[in-house]
């Protein structure tokens, strides 16, 4: 039996949270908690979801495992998984809300993840434009993200 406060199919990574929870519980039950690195655990959780037929990236599982209170994370997968704490300026407020609109992955395979990538790039471009780091959306690169942190 599983009890959770993460809404199911609401776009808040409930399947990733469950997969990570199951992996951590399995490691703990077998006395292997200290035998697997957080990076390896994230990789195993991603593989488990993909083996179950979920089209997923790796950010949801990684942040479920490596998230820390009071900080954002830059998650990089190339050449290997690496996370970096990102300070959120005091002037910035983030709202994470349940819209109560279902977001079932099986109905949106192939489009949902791509849409999220576009949304993140748009948000980066909007912040870079406002900060005067770029003049056009096309000028926005991964380097822009690092420049915004300075």
Image: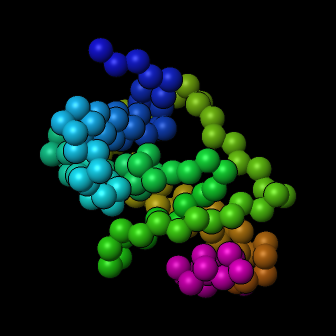
Segment tinted magenta in the rendering: 135-150
Q: Is residue 53 visible?
A: no
Residue lying at 66% horizontally and 82% vertically, measured from the top left: 147
In this rendering, position of residue 26 left or right of residue 124: left
Residue 57 relative to residue 97: left or right = left
User: Does the magenta segment cover residue 1?
Assistant: no
Q: In the figure, 30 relative to 50: above or below? A: above
As drawn, the residue found furthest toward the right would be: 91
Residue name at image x 34 percent, y 19 percent: 2
90 or 147: nearer the viewer: 90
Q: Residue 66: percent from the left, percent from the top?
A: 45, 53
Residue sitting at the far left:
51
Residue at 60 percent of width and 57 percent of height: 72
Q: How is the image coloured?
A: rainbow
Q: Position of residue 96 (x, y in %)?
A: 63, 40
Quadrant location of the C terminus in the rendered image: bottom right
Q: Is residue 16 visible?
A: yes
- Point out residue 68 in the picture as x, y percentages from the top left corner: 56, 51
Looking at the rendered image, the quarter that the N terminus falls into is top left
Q: Main secondary structure of the magenta part?
A: helix
């Amino acid at each position: 039996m599983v009890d959770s406060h993460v809404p199911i199919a609401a776009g808040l990574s409930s399947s990733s949270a469950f997969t990570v929870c199951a992996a951590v519980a399995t490691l703990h039950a077998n006395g292997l908690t200290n035998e697997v690195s957080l990076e390896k655990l994230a990789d195993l959780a991603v593989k488990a979801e993909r083996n179950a037929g979920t089209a997923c990236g790796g950010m949801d599982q990684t942040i479920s495992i490596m998230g820390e209170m009071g900080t954002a994370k830059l998650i990089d997968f190339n050449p290997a998984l690496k996370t970096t704490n990102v300070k959120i300026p005091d002037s910035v407020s983030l709202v994470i809300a349940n819209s109560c609109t279902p977001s079932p992955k099986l109905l949106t395979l192939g489009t949902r993840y791509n849409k999220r990538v576009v949304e993140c790039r748009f948000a980066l471009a909007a912040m870079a434009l406002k900060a005067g780091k770029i003049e056009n959306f096309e000028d926005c690169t991964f380097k822009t993200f690092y420049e915004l942190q300075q």
